[in-house]
Image: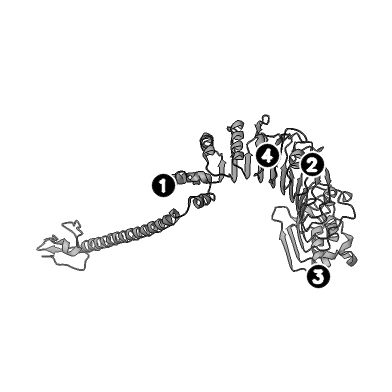
Amino acid sequence: IEKCNLEDGDGEGMKANGTVCNIQIQQRRNAFGRRTLPLLRSCSVGAYNRSVVVGLSAHHFRERSLRDKRRWSIQRALHLEALADSLGSVMDRISGLSDELLARILTFVPTKVAVSTSILSKRWEFLWTWVPKLEFVDNKYESYLAIKDFINKNLPLLKAPVIESFLLKCCSSFFQPEDITQWVATTVSRRIVELDIDCVYCWSGDPCLLLPSSLFTCESLVTLKLNGEMILLDVPRTISLPSLKTLHLGCVTYSKEDTFRLLLSYCPVLEDLVIRRSGHDNAKAIVVISPSLQRLTLPLDGGTSSSDEFVIVTPSLKYFNVEDYNGRHSYFVAHMRKVEEADITVDEYLEMVFESITSVKRLSLCVLFDFEERYMYHDGIFFSQLEHLKLGVSFDYWSKFLFRLLRDAPKLRVLKLYVYSGGRFKKYEPISWNNDPSAVPTCVLESLETFEFADYRGMQEERDFVSFIIKNACHLKSSTITPCTRMETCSSTDSSDD
C-alpha cells in the first residue's frame, strides 16, 4: 500500500495530497493465497481490515470444509472397501456350503425373501424350490392375483421331497375355493407335515371350501390348523391320521352333527386340541373323548347356543382352558387326575368344572358376574395340590368366595388377586372370620409366600382382606399392592371409609 497515511483504522479523513486515498493492490495473491477478493477503490482502513478478516475467515472455513469432505470420503471409501472384503469373505464361505444346507438356511426367512435370492446368481436361481417351508399371506399391500399365479405356477415345481409347513392366510374373498383345495391336495402329495389354512375374512355365504379327502388319510400330517366359516369339514368314511398331534379348529362348519366326534376318534396320538365355535357350525354337542390328549382349549365367545353340550373325557389332560361367556352350557367333564394347570373364565356355575380339576397345581380363575353363594361349588371339592392361584373377580362379596378357596387349598404359595368391581352395588358387611384365629386357612398360616393385589381401591372389604393376610401370613416373603388408576375412587363407591 503506497501513498497512504494509515491512521487508527476508523477510515475517516484518510487523504493523500488532499485527495481521497486510492487503495490499489496489485498483488493480492500474496496476501490471500489463491483467494481473490474484490475491493472498493475508495475505502477506509477499517473497512479494508474487515474485508481482509472476512476473506481470511471464509477462506479458512472453506478450506477446512474441503479437507473434512476429503477425509470423510477417504474414510467412507475405506469402510466400503472393508465391507466389500467382508461380504466377499462371507460369500466365499456361503459358496462353499452345500445346496441342501443353503435350502435349510432359507427356511428361517419368509418365502418372499427366499424367492428373491434367485437373482443373486445362476446357482441361486432355483435354490428356493428346495425350501420345505412355505407361507403365503394375502394382505392389502399385495395383489392377490400375483400370489395366486405364483402358487399355481411354482407349487407343483417344488423339489423338496417333503413339505414341512404350508401356511396360507387369506384376508380377502378373491381366492377361489377350488384353488385352495387343489393347493392342499398338492401339499398332501408331498407328505405335508404342518398345514395351516386361515380364511380370516368375514364370510356371509354358505360354506364352500371343501378340503380334499386325501387330507384325512395323510400319514405324515402332524399339525392341522383350520380357521374360517367358509371351510366345510366333511370327514369321509375312510379316515386315518396316525401322526396328528395338534388340531386347531376355528369357527369351521361341520357337515354333520357327529363330524367332529368321528374326526377325533381317528387321531390316536392327538395331544393339543383347540376348538373355537361359531353360531352356525351345525354341531349341537362337542364330544371330546381322547385318551392321549394333553392340552384342551375351549374359547366360547358367546356365538354358541345355551343348549349346546360339551362332553369331555380326557384322562391324560395336563392343561385345560375354557372361556365360557354364555354361562348356560351343559358340561359333562370326567375327572382329570393328571391336570396340572387350568385357565377358567366363566359367568357362573363353577361346580361342573371344579369337580374335574381338583388335582390342579396352577389355577387362573376369572368369574365375571355376580352369583349367589349356593352356586359357588359344593363341599367336598378339595384342591390338595394347588400352589399358584390367580383370581379375577367382578362381583360383590368376593372375599367370601376367596376365603373358601383358601380354605380348600392347604398348599397354596402364591396368590394374585384382581378385583374389578367388588363392593360397588351392595352394602358391605364385615366378615366374621376376620377376628376368628381358628378360622384362618392352613395355607395362610403355613405356606403362603407371595401376595399380590392389583386394582386396589381401598374399600372396606379390600382393606379387611389385606389386613387379614398381613396379620396372619406367617411365611409371607413378598407382598405387592397396586392401586387403581381409574377415575373412580373409594370415596365415591364406599361410604364406610375411615
Helix, strand, or loop for circle 4?
helix
Q: Which mark is residue 380?
A: none
Instruction: Calculate the distance from the C-alpha at mark 4 to the C-alpha at mark 2.
Output: 22 Å
Residue density around tag 1, few if under 14, some if 14–19, many if 20 or more, within 10 Å:
few
Q: Nearer the viewer, mark 3 or mark 2?
A: 2
Position of residue 123 relative to residue 34, above or below, is: above
* CB within 8 Å, label 4 to label 2: no
Mark sitting earlier along the chain (1/4): 1
Mark sitting earlier along the chain (3/4): 4
Mark sitting earlier along the chain (2/1): 1
Position of residue 83 relative to residue 199, above or below, is: below
Quadrant in which the N terminus appears: bottom left
Q: Nearer the viewer, residue 88 or 156?
A: 156
- In the picture of the structure, the residue carrying the numbered disc 3 is 474
Residue density around tag 2, few if under 14, some if 14–19, many if 20 or more, within 10 Å:
some
> Is residue 320 at all visible to an observer of this figure?
yes
- In the picture of the structure, the residue carrying the numbered disc 1 is 121
Position of residue 43 relative to residue 189, above or below, is: below
Q: Nearer the viewer, mark 4 or mark 2?
A: 4
Q: Nearer the viewer, residue 433 or 227?
A: 227
The residue lying at 21 percent from left, 59 percent from top is 35
Residue type, label 1: Ser
Residue type, label 4: Thr
* CB within 8 Å, label 1 to label 3: no
Mark sitting earlier along the chain (3/2): 2
Mark sitting earlier along the chain (1/3): 1
Helix, strand, or loop for circle 3?
loop
* CB within 8 Å, label 3 to label 4: no
Q: Position of residue 342 (x, y in %)?
A: 76, 53
Q: Nearer the viewer, residue 75 or 239?
A: 239
